[in-house]
Image (cartoon, rainbow, N blue to C red):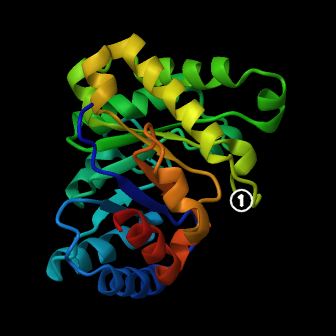
Amino acid sequence: MATRIPLISGNWKMHHNHFEALATVQKLSYLLGDDRNGRVEVSIHAPFTDLRSLQTSIEQDDMDISLGAQHCHWEDKGAFTGEVSPAMLAKLNVRYVIAGHSERREVFGETDEWVNNKVLAILRHGMTPILCCGETLDEREGDRTEDKVAGQVRAGLAGVSPEQVGALVLAYEPIWAIGTGRTATADDAQATCALVRGTVAEVAGAEAAAAVRVQYGGSVKPANAAELMGQPDIDGALVGGASLDADDFAKIVRGIDA
């Protein structure tokens, strides 16, 4: 099996102004230190208003943290009031961009086609998409998890070459476990992440499936992170609320890096 470096991503959602963001990332960098030696990668996905400040701090202080964005449009420019283009993010040295987060799909009505457009645009500008997939509680209880998750993966990867697929990140985030305090058991999370990897194999081949990193996201906390990350098909975490606190987020990273 290919060696896959875990990626632990902090999604701050609509939290932290740029002063709070700077304080949090500086404390996180201090707590993590610089002795990970490539064993675990960390990315921070802050609101758009924080990105320039975080870029400057991360680069000036040579932090071992990757800058991430939560969302983008797929066009480089145009009459899209309120949107941010992938070209703009690339100029800020953003490395990872989340595409198709469940909140973007469920709250803002993003379609599979839109998400695929974003994946292609992010790749076009030399950044790495974190392509999200996941099912609602009704879909889970109705035995529709496989259809929903596999369908989102197939749609999101349309037009992406096998080489590109192998280098990107997929995040399985059960919608029923986000912000609810409920978490899939390690066995359940592993089973669905294995489904994600199996779908990648169908779409892009075995080599891409062995290389692609699959994150789990859904009420990940210091208490459950190590068990979740210990599963063979889980290569990291997309962390929400626990990433807002530098101490908690550092515990998640250190627990996985132990």
Q: Quadrant of residue 250?
A: bottom left
Q: Position of residue 201 (x, y in %)?
A: 38, 16
Specify the quadrant that holds the C terminus. bottom left
Tell me which residue sits at (83%, 29%) in the image: 141
**Residue 236 point in image, percent of width and height:** 42, 51
Nearer to the camera, 158 or 109: 158
- Reading the image, the residue beneath label 1 is 179
- Image quadrant for the N terminus? top left
Looking at the rendered structure, the kind of residue marked 1 is Gly
Residue 210 position (above or below residue 188) = above
Point out residue 114 in the picture as x, y percentages from the top left corner.
Answer: 50, 28
Q: Is residue 230 above or below residue 255?
A: above
- Residue 210: quarter of image: top left
Q: In percent of the image, x 18 and y 83: which residue is there?
A: 61
Q: Which corner quadrant of the image does residue 253 belong to?
A: bottom left
Can the viewer see residue 61 in this picture? yes
Residue at figure coordinates x 48%, y 85% from the top left: 20
